[in-house]
Image: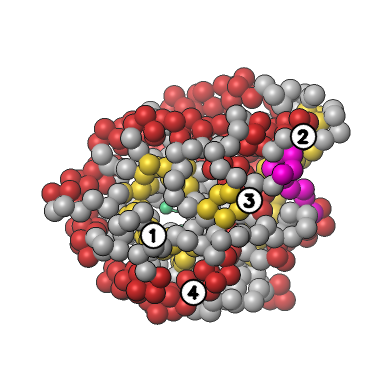
Amino acid sequence: MRITELRLHPIAVADPPLRSSYGRHAPYALRTVVELKSTDGLTGFSETYGGEKPLAALAAARARVEGMDPFQLLSLKLDMTAEADRAATEAAARSQMWLVPGENPLDEATRTYAAIEVACLDLIGKALNKPLCDVVGGRCRDEVAFSAYLFYKHAGGGGLGEDAREDEYGEVLDPEAMVGEARGFIAKYGFREIKLKGGVLEPELEIETIRLLRREFGPTVPLRIDPNCAWSIETSLRVARELKDELSGGGYLEDPCPGLEGMAELRRRMLAEGIETPLASNVVTTCFAHVPLAARMDAVQIVLSDPHYWGGIRSLQYLSHLCEVLGLGVSMHSNNHLGVSLMTMAHAAAAAPRISYACDTHYPWQTERDEIVAGGRIPFVNGCVRIPDRPGLGVELDYDQIARLTERYHKLPYRKRDDEAEMRQHVDPNWKRVLPRW
Ligand code: GKR
Ligand code: MG
């Protein structure tokens, strides 16, 4: 089998005005759908970051990909990422602190390779008539648990004008409203772990939010909070102290403060006070070179994997193994995405045994009107996605939807995610991302 054609579909997906330390989400999130056609008449898919740069990087890979045998992933990986991986030894430069995910030029090669790899594995699964996780060595679970990924948000459901989406949760800018959002998420999807995106309100209010969530759902629902580096070491320590009980029992503190050194110092000071809440990260550990370093410094105890920027599904398996050897835990990070990415994440987690936490997903923030998977939205049952008994990723594309979302992409004035610009336009004309803010 050979790849005959690489097709790229840039799309725009309605997204509510969610808040984080990056700023505010724009009315449409950008994604790219990759399609590989083969000499066997099969088509493999993947979904990745959107906008100009990811699209250009994928287009530049076309000459290498067209004509290749999709089974020969190793040589493709070496060709595309070896140089970037060598450069990644400059660990700090590869951090995800200032750039929104998908915009760091240092992980561009890995991201681009990942999108091609997943589409090749989808092709291989289809050629062998096997689910994707079974063609990379088999699965350790048939269903993958996801967490309720809660965001503070402004009023609005995403989209613009006649294309605006219903606002399911309304404005959520205080602790009580967040409990309402959480109730909605859990009633609708059955999630059994909660992640709160923090770094938005004063830390006292975010502490209060976690306390109310604990009161509402009890200790059997693990809680995690992620302010994306918005707190100083001092503030992080105070939050860790105040939420010592609430973040225990399967919860964690994610990227509270900037930098590997900052996280390591926080950890030392937490342990000195008897606070054992693990620190997780998708900011200071974004590539393999970071992992032994973070372990040695004890800066991170849980690495947040993500097939989209760690180099695909097989890289996630390596990461799972490496973390096992180093005694680190593994969970999964997410960004806005649709059903093709959700299935990629589910297959990746099914094939990576060290993942022991419910994976993050932005999926509930998108709607049926934007789904690109034929047949509509992928269901969560008790907070889990089941690995379908179908070849490859187990989904096909809805081409009418792709056409609609591509048309919308071309009408948009922006070609990259810029949460700061959204803040300045809608909330405060002088808003700047300041890390740490508190
Ligand atoms: O969607 O605003 C967001 C998140 O802040 C996302 O961009 C982060 O990468 O979910 C991510 C995280 O865990 O840091
Ligand atoms: Mg995070």
Earlier along the polypeptide chain: callout 4 or callout 3?
Answer: 4
Earlier along the polypeptide chain: callout 4 or callout 2?
Answer: 2
How far apart marks 1 and 2 lie (CA) works out to 37 Å
Q: Magenta segment range?
A: 389-398
Disc 2 crowd rating (10 Å Cα; few below 14, some 14-19, many 20+) is some
Most foreground residue, 404 or 389: 389
Where residue 412 sits, quadrant-wise, is: bottom right
Residue 58: x %, y % from top left? 66, 37
The numbered disc on residue 222 is 1
Q: Which of the two discs, 4 and 3, sits closer to the camera?
A: 3
45 over 200 or under it: above or below: above
Looking at the rendered structure, the kind of residue marked 2 is Asn
* Quadrant of the frame with the N terminus: top right
The numbered disc on residue 386 is 3
The residue shown at (64%, 34%) is 134
How far apart marks 4 and 3 lie (CA) works out to 23 Å
Earlier along the polypeptide chain: callout 1 or callout 2?
Answer: 2
Q: Which SS class for mark 2?
A: loop
Give the left or right position of residue 14, taking residue 99 as reference: right
Looking at the rendered structure, the kind of residue marked 1 is Pro
The residue shown at (46%, 33%) is 319
Looking at the rendered structure, the kind of residue marked 4 is Arg
Q: Which residue is mark 2?
A: 129
How far apart marks 3 and 1 lie (CA) works out to 21 Å
Give the left or right position of residue 219, taking residue 152 as reference: left
Q: Which SS class for mark 3?
A: strand
Residue 14: x %, y % from top left? 64, 65
How far apart marks 1 and 4 lie (CA) works out to 15 Å
